[in-house]
Image (cartoon, rainbow, N blue to C red):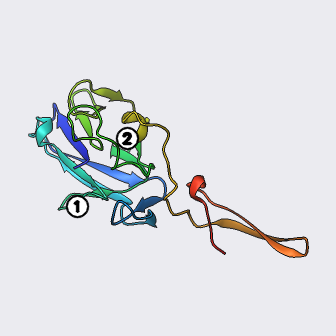
Amino acid sequence: MELFIGIINASENITFTMTAQSEVWGANKWADDLMLTDMYSASEWTADYTRISTTSWKGWNFVLSQDYGGGYPVYGYGLYKFSKDENHYFYLDYRDERFGAYESFGYPYGHPADLWIKYNAGLDSFYYSSTRYDPWIPINNGDYLPIWEIKQMEDPTRDRFQPTTPFNLAITWFNNRPLLNWHCSEPRSAATYEV
């Protein structure tokens, strides 16, 4: 697991969903360029209300996990809406090619990519921790959480992301030659096309 979800002060299991809000990239190996995919666009996990201890929580595997699913839902490089229902949600941004290969960070050692999400049913509120211990940081409804900031990394890099399909292609003439212009949505830093 890289993304764990647990619930407290609840009397029944709760299902949470992750739905892509951007393009999603994935690869089979760490060194591969990251290709656009629709395989990791939406998934859900039902958290067991009897699993109180953070050491017993389960959830999502990152697409480049060694386990590659193992019966658990997976997610890729993308911007996701994490929700309990339409009125309880926030956004997790994993659009950083370094994610999954961050240097070992914080305590406990060995969890550089892990993130724990806690839902307190009694208070009807979300929290997160990058160590599964205190402090638990409150998440407000609609919050945007970039993983590189949670993990105290620099700005994200996206050079290995396959550029999105170009749009608004326009052909004009310049010095008696055709000049092609187009737009792409993201990531702009990786927008290199071969004509």
The location of residue 11, given as percent across then percent down, is: 12, 37
Q: Is residue 109 left or right of residue 85?
A: left
| Label 1 CA crowd tier, 10 Å (few <14, some 14–19, many 20+) | some
Q: Residue at x 46, y 52 (%)?
A: 21
Mark 1, secondary structure of its residue:
loop
First of labels 2, 1 by sequence position: 1
Q: Quadrant of residue 29?
A: bottom left
Say which of 135 and 192 sits in front. 192
Residue at the outermost right position: 175
Q: What's the CA distance linking mark 2 and mark 1?
A: 24 Å
The type of residue carrying mark 1 is Gly
- Let me know if residue 85 appears in the view: no
Mark 2, secondary structure of its residue:
strand
Q: Quadrant of the C terminus?
A: bottom right
User: Any mark on residue 89, and which?
Assistant: 2
User: Any mark on residue 69, and which?
Assistant: 1
Q: Residue at x 33, y 66 (%)?
A: 28
The type of residue carrying mark 2 is Tyr
